[in-house]
């Protein structure tokens, strides 16, 4: 008995900029000693991916498998589901759907069942209990973020440069002296670029004769979810402890 | 907090450097409501249909212009349907990486468990046999019924979840039998009335 699912996640690997995608295309890139200046250029990368849907698909499935195994700690071997400790604790089951967006990039919507999740009835009681609420807060603090210093308002966000190519990089090296700071810095740069919603006319705001502008399908849903998840957040904004 | 930022998973953001989104499904019964929300998202039909009518019109216009054997109305109607279907097959837009995923057998879902079909009608049949009270809608319950009612309510909770499951994975839990429409219910009730 798995009880209700605990998390709903969307993952949208960036096939345009991720160097791993370029390795699948056949570019010679040293991932252990990565240097963004050595190219290929942004234009060449986009060309590579557009010309090679096999590499794009291979990249997507490789990334998702790797994320499931290394970050979420869940491996499926035959009929067995092996749950190791991952970033969310132990994941006992997952179900996800692959979709393509307008520019043909694949993304995944996945529901995760966490080990020892309370049943619906237990949850109703537990949420009234302060010590359990504190556990939920610390879980949110560790795994969900909607704020970092500098990301307060549209104005403050504008001051952080929008680095289109931020994904053409590797995660910071843990052996590096100021690893923690690099980590935090990268998180802010990626969040600023990738998790900020800007509604543009025609792209997501479609002109409508009767009602003026309205918000288009999936985008509308994302914005709604965003706002509703803000309302639901138990412990207020989660702040990066390292900053 | 700025409302135009969606919630992210720091570990994903740093390691994969991509757009991601997370939502905690915590508040029990409200999770049920979210479940329906997610379901529509999760089981959303693949492919883009916004250009479908244009594709259809273009394909059909091409045929009408080029062929000479559209003498009878009947032929035209038959050909119309045939051509619309052919046009959809030929010209519907699919993302190339999605096509590759299907060709390579990588599929369009990620699931940790294997699923099997549940024959819903037999399940409902069994429930009605064990809890005949479920069929007597609108009639005042007898004392015996009240006793069963309590048991049914316990079962109801589980039924609730099975229904949710069916919403999560409608493609996996396919209803192969007759649906529980009022008319099918009536026939069951009548036949049971005779034997009883």
Image (cartoon, rainbow, N blue to C red):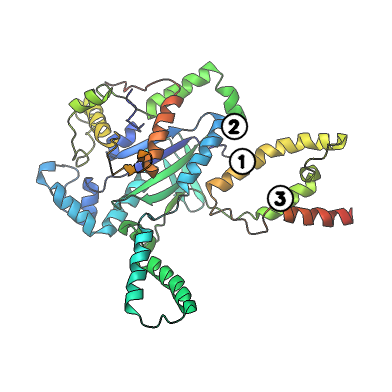
Instruction: Report in which chain the residue with disc 2 lies.
Output: A
* Local SS, label 2: helix
Residue A118 appearing in the image: no
Chain letter of the residue beneath label 1 in the structure image: B
| A60 is higher (above) or lower (below) than B5 | below
- Picture disc at residue A120: 2
Which chain is indicated by disc 3? B
10 Å neighbourhood of mark 3: few (<14), some, or many (≥20)?
some
Measured in 3D between alpha carbons, the distance from the residue under mark 3 to the one under mark 2, in whole angstroms, is 23 Å
Give the x, y percent position of residue A91. 47, 38
Instruction: Give the residue at mark 1.
Output: B161
At x 51% / y 36%, what residue is drawn?
B34
Q: Nearer the viewer, residue A26 or B27?
A: B27
Which residue is depicted at the point 61% across and 41% down? B161
Q: Which mark is residue B124?
A: 3
Q: Are marks 3 and 2 on the same chain?
A: no
Spatial separation of the CA atoms under disc 1 and disc 3: 14 Å
Which secondary structure, mark 3? helix
Q: Is residue A15 above or below residue A122?
A: below
Residue B140 figure quarter: top right
- In the image, what residue occupies the spot 27% across and 45% down? A14
Crowd rating for badge 2 (residues with CA inside 10 Å; few <14, some 14–19, many 20+):
many
Q: From the viewer's perspective, is B156 left or right of A240?
A: right
Residue A19: horizontal and vertical position, in percent? Answer: 21, 46
Which residue is at 50% across, 20% downward? A133
Quarter of the image where the N terminus of chain A is located: top right
3 and 2 marks in contact (CB < 8 Å): no
């Amino acid at each position: 008995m798995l009880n209700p699912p605990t998390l709903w996640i969307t993952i949208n690997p960036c096939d345009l900029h991720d160097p791993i995608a370029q390795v699948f295309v056949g570019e010679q890139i040293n991932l252990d000693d990565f240097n963004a200046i050595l190219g290929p250029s942004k234009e060449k990368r986009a060309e590579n991916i557009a010309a090679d849907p096999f590499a794009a698909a291979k990249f997507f499935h490789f990334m998702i498998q790797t994320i499931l195994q290394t970050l979420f700690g869940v491996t499926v071997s035959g009929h067995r589901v092996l749950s190791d400790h991952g970033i969310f604790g132990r994941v006992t089951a997952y179900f996800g759907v692959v979709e393509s967006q307008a520019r043909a990039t694949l993304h995944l919507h996945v529901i995760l069942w966490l080990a020892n999740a309370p049943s619906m009835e237990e949850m109703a009681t537990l949420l009234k209990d302060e010590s359990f609420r504190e556990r939920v807060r610390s879980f949110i603090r560790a795994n969900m973020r909607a704020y970092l210093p500098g990301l307060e308002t549209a104005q403050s966000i504008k001051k952080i440069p929008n680095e289109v190519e931020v994904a053409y990089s590797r995660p910071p090296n843990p052996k590096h002296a100021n690893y923690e700071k690099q980590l935090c810095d990268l998180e802010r740069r990626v969040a600023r670029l990738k998790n900020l919603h800007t509604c543009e006319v025609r792209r997501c705001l479609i002109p409508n004769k009767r009602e003026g502008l309205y918000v288009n399908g999936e985008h509308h849903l994302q914005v709604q979810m965003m706002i509703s998840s803000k309302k639901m957040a138990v412990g207020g904004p989660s702040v990066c402890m390292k900053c | 907090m700025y409302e135009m930022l969606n919630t992210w998973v720091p570990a994903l953001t740093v390691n994969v450097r991509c757009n991601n989104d997370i939502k905690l499904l915590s508040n029990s019964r409200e999770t049920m409501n979210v479940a329906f929300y997610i379901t529509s998202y999760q089981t959303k039909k693949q492919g883009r249909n916004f250009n479908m009518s244009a594709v259809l019109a273009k394909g059909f216009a091409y045929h009408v212009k080029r062929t000479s054997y559209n003498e009878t109305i009947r032929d035209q109607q038959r050909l119309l349907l045939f051509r619309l279907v052919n046009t959809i097959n030929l010209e519907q837009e699919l993302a190339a990486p999605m096509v590759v995923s299907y060709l390579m057998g990588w599929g369009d879902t990620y699931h940790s468990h294997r699923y099997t079909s549940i024959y819903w009608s037999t399940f409902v049949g069994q429930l009605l046999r064990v809890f005949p009270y479920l069929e007597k809608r609108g009639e005042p319950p007898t004392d015996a019924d009240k006793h069963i009612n309590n048991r049914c309510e316990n079962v109801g909770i589980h039924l609730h979840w099975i229904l949710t499951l069916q919403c999560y994975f409608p493609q996996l839990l396919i209803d192969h039998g007759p649906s529980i429409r009022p008319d099918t219910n009536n026939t069951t009730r009548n036949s049971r009335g005779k034997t009883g």
